[in-house]
Image: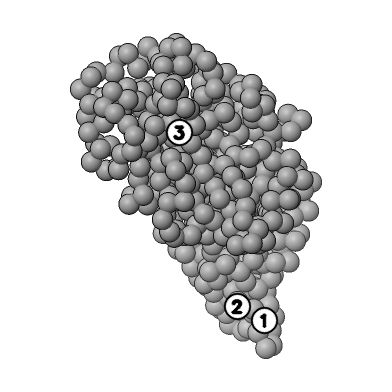
Amino acid sequence: MRKPKLGMVFLAGDSWWQAGVCDATTGPYAGFLDRVQDDVDNARAALAQACEIISSGLLHTEAEAAAEARRLAAARVDAVVLCPIIWTNDQPVVAFLREAPEAPLLLWAYDPHAGFLEYFSVPEWLRASGPVSVQQCSNILRRFGRHYDVVHGNEGDPVACGELLAFARAATVKRSLEGARIAMLPAPSQVVMGSWVDDFHLRERFGVELVYLSVESYAERVQEIADKDAREYAAWLRERCRCEGIDEAQLARSAREAVAMARLAEDEGLCGIALEDFNEAFTRLLGARPHLYHPRLGELGCTVGLEADVPNILATVVLARLAGGPAMFNELFSIDRHANTVLMGHPGMGEPGLGDPDSYLLTPDLEIDASQPRGVWWSYRAQPGPMTFLNFTPEYGQLKAAAWHGSALEGKRMMEGYAHMLVAPEHNALDMFKRIVRLGLIQHWGTVHGELRAELRAFAGMCGLDLVEL
């Protein structure tokens, strides 16, 4: 993901200029405006390392606020941070909102002192009066129908800075989904009907386009892959993965299909492919389900998931973009209530970037008996570390959102053939499982390494999702 493009709007009340406070050269207000300017500069500089900042600095008139709104709209910023850094008149806020871009908006209640002083002189209190104005602005924002979030602190506060940067990253991911394409290959699943989704809702809420591709069109691509390309990929896999129970013909056929899947993603500009892998056309036209992963998919940021579960392919894409790294379409297999652990995993095209390379394994499709034609799987056990899990479940034309956090545990492979992980959740595993079931969540989860709590909260707010944290 690119750097977030962040508009930062700093406002101060024009009343303080009229009162002579900002122009004072003697008395208690001498140097007051310089200190506020320093606060503005420090706030911008702290975020400039991670974001592209668009800001004109401290503003106090309606004309300046309106001009800044037009500037941010022309720049197509991903998000706006509105910081009435000291008490601010409503007029410039209204002037800004009338022409502000339709971008996610965060109110920053700036706290220059990082807490309360033992005694506040009036100038020092005025310098710390931003939270008053944030409260005042919130009413204006609500009456303008604008959604917003709020953060409190200053640039030296790691919690405040973390929330600001998380908001900016979430806004960038939201913007990145506009025009994103997920392919249904070939149709909604008839055996996992909970994955059925409202196409129009995806477009309206996220800007995501759902396209339908036939197995026949994919099979034609498979036939177009040169023998040389298939052999090279098969050899590349053998260098990196232990092999069990597969022969050269199996691997060559599956390698050809994997290359074709990556070409499909690239040619169609896809961020996700929802395979309805139970569809008989795959067996009829290809001989077996196409389940072998190709690393080009990861380079393209394309998630391939099974059972045509578009919502949780989208959840996986969101996590990958928030984390700036690989994510896996996953499934909650079961829990060990005594050890307080959760076993996660999935057949098919798991993302090996999450896996421990020492655990890489190529096997046949072990969900199918050896008497039947079988393709090749690439599986692993996930690397240890903190992880975030996100679920989107369709219900009444909308999407429910739920998330939880835990740590993938280190260890040897626990499962034959499946990409998998053993996770210790933050809270009681059995209680979490019961809550998941009571909420009626589908079994699939997007999974990524990292702690993305703040980013998910911000993203959910921007997209109008009621995020349940388990």
Q: Secondary structure at mark 3?
A: loop
Tell us which disc is closer to us: 3 or 1: 3
- Residue 57 located left or right of residue 20: left
Mark 2 residue type: His
Dot 1, how many residues are within 10 Å of its Cα: few (below 14), some (14-19), or many (20+)?
Answer: few
Q: Residue at x 59, y 44 (%)?
A: 333
Gap in angstroms between the C-alphas marked 1 and 2: 7 Å
Q: Which mark is residue 116?
A: 1
Q: For mark 2, what is the residue? A: 113
Gap in angstroms between the C-alphas marked 3 and 1: 64 Å
Q: Is residue 27 visible?
A: yes
Q: In front here: 396 or 461?
A: 396
Q: For mark 3, what is the residue? A: 366
Viewport quadrant of the C terminus? bottom right
Q: Which callout, 2 or 3, points at the residue further toward the start of the chain?
A: 2
Q: In front here: 177 or 226?
A: 226
Q: In front here: 123 or 372?
A: 372
Residue 128, x across and y down, in percent = 65, 73
Mark 1 residue type: Phe
Q: Quadrant of residue 463?
A: top right
Check if mark 1's residue and mark 2's residue have beta carbons within 8 Å.
yes
Q: Which callout, 3 or 1, points at the residue further toward the start of the chain?
A: 1
Check if mark 3's residue and mark 1's residue have beta carbons within 8 Å.
no
Residue 396, x across and y down, in percent = 76, 30
Against 234, residue 286 (above or below) is: above
Residue 271, x across and y down, in percent = 47, 32
Residue 323, x across and y down, in percent = 47, 50
Residue furthest to the bottom: 118
